[in-house]
């Protein structure tokens, strides 16, 4: 039914939760465009699913006990119930609508059973009375096909096959020659009580492709079947389009009568009620036996506990029906209208029903108790494991806090790697912590509310410890990364300044201070000294900022050895700077003296003035260096050093 190009449905209960694929399905069935909300929130999903329910209501598909939240929450029972209602309305009813109109019948199931009985009448080995047990041996499926397509296979050959072989044969013939997909597995049909809904859906596919001829006589024949078979047809009438909670698991969970005491207390009524209760009980026993062994994984046990809790609720819902059947049997015996054989049979039936019910009830309660004990033990282990892990981690943090920060950048990198290891451990533990947010607490008469209070207090304490560990880890990560960033910046700036000083020292060493050939050579060297002086004036701010950055890093580190190393590096740079300034002053003095020396070429007064000016400027520069340094720019705010700044 879905339009081409749509992504396939991989998980029915998950993929249908947001309502979009259901709306796509209804678009194909109704031929009308249906708007969808594309958001991913729960509100968007509810709006989509509610629109689905609205469309179904507009198309006269009545749903009982199915709401939008059930589908959004992924309720398996009600999701299957919703899909079954859609199948009944658009597939089963659509296939039969013409013949139902001609015969003025509203019971689709009755028409289908009439057609099957009419098709299989010539086959003495086949007597179809219902849509469950009559199909388990595979003969009925083959008979329906052979009646209308006898050229496809030999009936005598089919009789000699086993039930599973017959079913496989019929499904293969239907697929290869009639174009009907294998909707059923032979192993699922060859059982004591096949699934009624599945049988009806497959027969509807056969009904659609094979000749259809049903008369009122055929329908009246179905209506005259024994009460036990007629009742199945009437109770399952899918014109009602109702899905009850008990039916959601499939027809193997046959409904028990609401109250047996309301029907006439005759033997036939009792037998019908008894058979329905025993059918349900058999199915419940199968479900109970199929439950997996109790796991040792806490999440799996939670799921098992939830599943078994639903099963226990179902037992409780059917308890009154079992009691009503037993009461009806006792009343029949007490009336004294039964033959000895009938009375003995009823006594045996009640004994069997009571013993099997009691056995299932006791075993179910025992499993519930064991699941409870296992779940509480595993959750207790979870809490203890987290407490132990927090204790070890807190000791680990105390040790890390007691250690000084690194002596050098390489050691700081190792501390960062160690801290990343702590963060990784936190992320791994986070998965277990998340599991603890969904703890299951069973409050019984013995523990009462005290169990919940104790657990909540324990969880609160662990939550506070966990939060403290996470907060410290994040704050330390930020601090270490900030220190690493500043320290790298300091070392890079130091390297740049060292290279700059080397460049200027080499440039100064190439300046001539005497024995000038002429005025031009003197002017060139004077200009070199002026440029060097100007460059150093501009670079002075860089030296000040570098000193400031070194102080910041040393204060944050709080490591005497690292601080001493930073101070030494800064002192070396300062000494090189002062040495370069002194050399520049000396060279300027020498050039000035050379101007008035004997044997020098005639030099213009302008050049001498420039030289004198340079000397004066250098002297002024030196004089300024002897004064207290001007206030430095406001230092950058470094996390964690506010106290040091105040001092």
Image: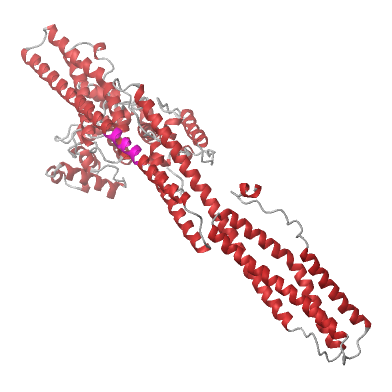
Q: In the rendering, at what x and y percent does residue 219 appear? A: 27, 25
Q: In the rendering, at what x and y percent does residue 441 appear? A: 34, 29
* Count of numbered tags: 0
Q: In the rendering, at what x and y percent does residue 143 appear? A: 20, 39
Q: Residue at x 11, y 44 (%)?
A: 160
Scheme of colours in the image: secondary structure
Whether 488 is drawn above or below 151: the answer is: below
Q: Which residue is at the front of the view, 576 or 175?
A: 576
Queried whether the magenta region covers residue 383, the answer comes back as: yes
Q: On the picture, is 215 further left or further right than 33?
A: left
Queried whether the magenta region covers residue 295, the answer comes back as: no
To which quarter of the image does residue 231 belong?
top left
Q: In the rendering, at what x and y percent does residue 444 appear? A: 30, 22
Whether 467 is drawn above or below 324: the answer is: below
Q: Which residue is at the front of the view, 468 or 279?
A: 468
Q: Residue at x 51, y 51 (%)?
A: 477
Q: On the picture, is 563 further left or further right than 339?
A: right
Q: On the picture, is 508 further left or further right than 240?
A: right
Residue 213 in sight from this viewpoint? no
To which quarter of the image does residue 276 belong?
top left
Secondary structure predominantly adopted by residues drawn in magenta: helix
Q: Which residue is at the front of the view, 153 or 440?
A: 440
Q: Residue at x 35, y 42 (%)?
A: 388
Tell me the quadrant of the picture where the N terminus can be found: top left
Residue 391 in sight from this viewpoint? yes
The residue sitting at the top extreme is: 335
Q: On the picture, is 195 further left or further right than 606?
A: left
The residue sitting at the left extreme is: 340
Q: Residue at x 30, y 29 (%)?
A: 309
The magenta region covers 374-385
Whether 129 is drawn above or below 5: the answer is: above
């Amino acid at each position: 039914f879905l339009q081409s190009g749509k992504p396939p449905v991989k998980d029915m209960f998950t993929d249908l939760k947001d309502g979009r694929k259901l709306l796509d399905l209804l678009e194909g069935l109704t031929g009308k465009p249906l708007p969808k909300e594309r958001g991913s929130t729960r509100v968007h999903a509810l709006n989509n699913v509610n629109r689905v329910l609205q469309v179904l209501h507009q198309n006269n598909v009545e749903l009982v006990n199915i709401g939008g939240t059930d589908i959004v929450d992924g309720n398996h029972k009600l999701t299957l119930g919703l899909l079954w209602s859609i199948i009944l309305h658009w597939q089963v009813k659509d296939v039969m609508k013409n013949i139902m109109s001609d015969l003025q019948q509203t019971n689709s199931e009755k028409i289908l059973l009439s057609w099957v009985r009419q098709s299989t009448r010539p086959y003495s080995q086949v007597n179809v009375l219902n849509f469950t047990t009559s199909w388990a041996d595979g003969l009925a499926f083959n008979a329906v096909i052979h009646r209308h397509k006898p050229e496809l296979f030999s009936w005598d050959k089919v009789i000699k096959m086993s039930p599973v072989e017959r079913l496989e044969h019929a499904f293969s013939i239907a697929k290869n020659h009639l174009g009907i997909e294998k909707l059923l597995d032979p192993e699922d049909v060859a059982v004591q009580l096949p699934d009624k809904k599945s049988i009806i859906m497959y027969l509807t596919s056969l009904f659609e492709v094979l000749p259809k001829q049903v008369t009122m006589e055929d329908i009246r024949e179905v209506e005259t079947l024994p009460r036990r078979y007629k009742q199945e047809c009437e109770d399952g009438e899918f014109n009602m389009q109702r899905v009850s909670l008990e039916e959601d698991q499939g027809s193997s969970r046959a409904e028990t009568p609401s109250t047996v005491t309301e029907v006439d207390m005759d033997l036939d009524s009792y037998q019908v009620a008894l058979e329905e209760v025993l059918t349900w009980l058999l199915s419940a026993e199968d479900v109970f036996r199929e439950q997996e062994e109790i796991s040792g994984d806490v999440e799996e046990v939670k799921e098992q506990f939830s599943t078994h809790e639903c099963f226990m609720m179902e037992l409780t819902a059917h308890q009154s029906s079992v009691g009503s059947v037993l009461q009806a049997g006792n009343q029949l015996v007490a009336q004294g209208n039964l033959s000895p054989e009938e009375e003995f049979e009823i006594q045996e039936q009640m004994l069997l029903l009571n013993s099997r019910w009691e056995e299932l009830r006791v075993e179910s309660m025992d499993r519930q108790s064991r699941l409870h004990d296992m779940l509480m033990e595993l959750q207790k282990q979870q809490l203890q494991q987290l407490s132990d892990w927090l204790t070890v981690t807190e000791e680990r943090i105390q040790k890390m806090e007691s250690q000084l920060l690194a002596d050098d950048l390489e050691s700081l990198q190792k501390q960062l790697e160690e801290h990343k290891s702590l963060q990784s451990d936190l992320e791994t533990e986070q998965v277990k912590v998340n599991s603890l947010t969904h703890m299951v607490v069973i409050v019984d008469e013995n523990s009462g509310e005290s169990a919940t209070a104790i657990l909540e207090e324990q969880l609160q304490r662990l939550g506070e410890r966990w939060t403290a560990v996470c907060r410290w880890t994040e704050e330390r990560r930020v601090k270490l990364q900030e220190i690493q960033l500043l320290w790298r910046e300091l070392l890079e700036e130091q390297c740049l300044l060292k290279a700059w000083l080397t460049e200027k020292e080499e440039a100064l060493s190439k300046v001539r201070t005497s024995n000038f050939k002429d005025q031009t050579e003197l002017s060139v060297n004077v200009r070199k000294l002026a440029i060097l002086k100007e460059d150093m004036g501009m670079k002075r701010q860089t030296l000040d900022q570098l000193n400031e950055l070194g102080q910041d890093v040393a204060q944050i580190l709080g490591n005497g050895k690292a601080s001493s190393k930073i101070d030494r590096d800064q002192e070396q740079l300062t000494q090189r700077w002062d040495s370069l300034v002194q050399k520049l002053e000396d060279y300027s003095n020498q050039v000035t003296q050379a101007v008035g020396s004997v044997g020098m070429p005639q030099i213009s007064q302008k050049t001498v003035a420039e030289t004198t000016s340079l000397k004066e400027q250098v002297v002024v520069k030196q004089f300024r260096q002897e004064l207290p340094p001007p206030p430095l720019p406001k230092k950058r705010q470094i996390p964690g050093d506010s106290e040091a700044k105040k001092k």
